[in-house]
Amino acid sequence: MNKNGSIVYVIDDDFYVRESIEDLLRSVGHEVRSYGSVEAFLGDHRIDLPTCLVLDVRLPDTSGLEFQRLQESIGIRFPIVFITGHGDIPMSVAAMKAGAIEFLTKPFRDQDLLDAVHAGIALDRRRRADEEALTELRARYTSLTPREQETMALVVTGMLNKQIAAGLGLSEMTVKVHRAQVMRKMNAPSLADLVRIADSLNAATGKA
């Protein structure tokens, strides 16, 4: 495993292209696995590390573009760098609109591929960090009692303690206690921090 804790998957049906890309990526310290088809890739055990996928557009059975469209439905969210010897502008536009990092036409410059792979790994590393942070926020929110969750929902709207007390039918002192517990459990030093946390949780669940 390389020092950065990442892996690059290469899918191309040309053995010599795969070998060349493997050599290039390993020469700069990347861990690499390569496959001749999407099916071979899907049938192998995948390492749970920040990842970039170098993917040929034209492949036997499932094409690279088809696999890009299918990724989400099969639980894969790898950044993709497309490579092709038969690319055209509409194809490259479609790939980039669907989220590809880069669309390189063979023969491409080694540095262009390396730059694209590095960008893909960096993107996947950020995605994983964001998901880990969100998982932690959700765990904190789950630790709140139902009453504390109700209090938090009103606090982040800017309501005062006495307004919250009236709305929930509680004493102002009880609201202060719930509010303090919310701030502590959510690890929010300030109201602004709590609002940002609430916005993150709402965004993740699709709430307005």
Image (cartoon, rainbow, N blue to C red):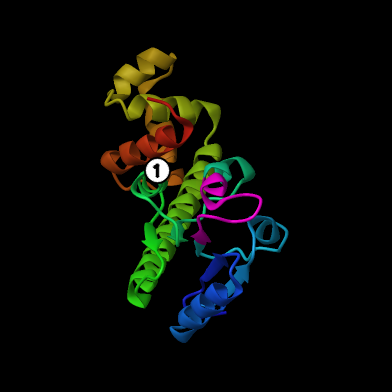
- Crowding around mark 1 (Cα neighbors within 10 Å: few <14, some 14 to 19, many 20+) is few
Nearer-the-camera pick, 196 or 10: 10
The residue lying at 45 percent from left, 52 percent from top is: 133
Q: Is residue 121 above or below residue 201?
A: below
Q: Residue at x 38, y 35 (%)?
A: 198
Query: At numbered mark 1, what does the secondary structure look like: helix, strand or loop?
Result: helix
Instruction: Determine the residue positioned at 30% across, 25% down.
Output: 157
Amino acid type at mark 1: Ala
- Which residue is more in the foreground, 43 or 108? 108
| Residue 169 visible somewhere in the drawing | yes
Name the outermost residue toward the bottom: 27
Q: How many marks?
A: 1
Give the side of residue 66 with respect to residue 166, left or right. Answer: right
Residue 96 magenta:
no
Image quadrant occupied by the N terminus: bottom right
Question: Which quarter of the figure has residue 171?
Answer: top left
Above or below residue 158? Residue 114 is below
Q: Is residue 196 left or right of residue 48?
A: left
**22 left or right, relative to 201:** right
User: Which residue is under mark 1?
Assistant: 94
Span shown in magenta: 55-68
Using the image, determine if residue 72 lies above or below residue 16.
above
Q: Position of residue 176 (x, y in %)?
A: 37, 31
Give the position of the C terminus as an image quadrant. Answer: top left
Q: Is residue 3 visible?
A: no
Asked which quadrant contains residue 181, the reply is top left
Judge whether 138 appears above or below 25 on screen.
above
